[in-house]
Amino acid sequence: MSKREELIAKYAGDLEKKCGMKPDMKLLTAVTIGCGPSIYNADASTVSAGDKKELDRVKKNFLMKKLGLKDTPKLDEGIQAAITTYGKSNRNKYRAVFYYLLVKHFRKGSVYK
């Protein structure tokens, strides 16, 4: 198994155990690949949900640029929903899983087709 496949399996486990959902493996794989080399960097592979600047970057670079969403209060609501789903007390929020939750929340899976 490649390093990327191992990470995707780890992310699927997080979705099942911490988020209580059965992942769409095809979409999870596409989102993970879309994260690029950041998944291999310990710091870049996670999202700091307590850091306002980090969440603003997620909003601007992922939700608006990648998913093509307009800057409305709905984006902040979606980010908070992803944080809640992943678990506020869960310190390690993997970027690929967090982005997957956002894609599902905003029903933007078509971006990865």
Image (tube, rainbow, N blue to C red):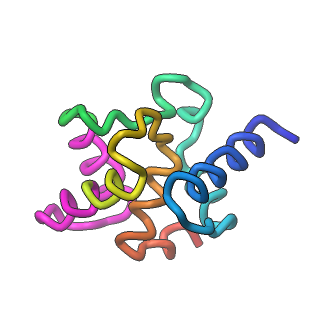
- Residue drawn where x is 25% and y is 34% of the image: 50
Residue 47 is left or right of residue 57, and the answer is right
Q: Nearer the viewer, residue 105 or 86?
A: 86
* Magenta stretch, residue numbers: 55-79
Residue 47 at x, y percent in the picture:
39, 37
Vertically, is 58 above or below 67?
above
- Residue drawn where x is 39% and y is 61% of the image: 102
Residue 67 at x, y percent in the picture:
37, 63
Residue 40 at x, y percent in the picture:
62, 29
Residue 16 at x, y percent in the picture:
60, 59
Q: Residue furthest right?
A: 1
Q: Residue furthest top?
A: 42
Q: Nearer the viewer, residue 14 or 48?
A: 14
Quarter of the rendering occupied by the N terminus: top right
Q: Quadrant of residue 41?
A: top right
The number of callouts visible is 0
Quarter of the rendering occupied by the C terminus: bottom right
Residue 42 is left or right of residue 63, and the answer is right
Q: Quadrant of residue 31?
A: bottom right
Q: Report the magenta stretch's main SS.
A: helix
Residue 93 is left or right of residue 37, and the answer is left
Vertically, is 99 above or below 88?
below
Look at the image and say whether residue 2 sits in the magenta stretch.
no
Look at the image and say whether residue 77 sits in the magenta stretch.
yes
- Residue drawn where x is 41% and y is 33% of the image: 91
Q: Residue furthest left?
A: 73
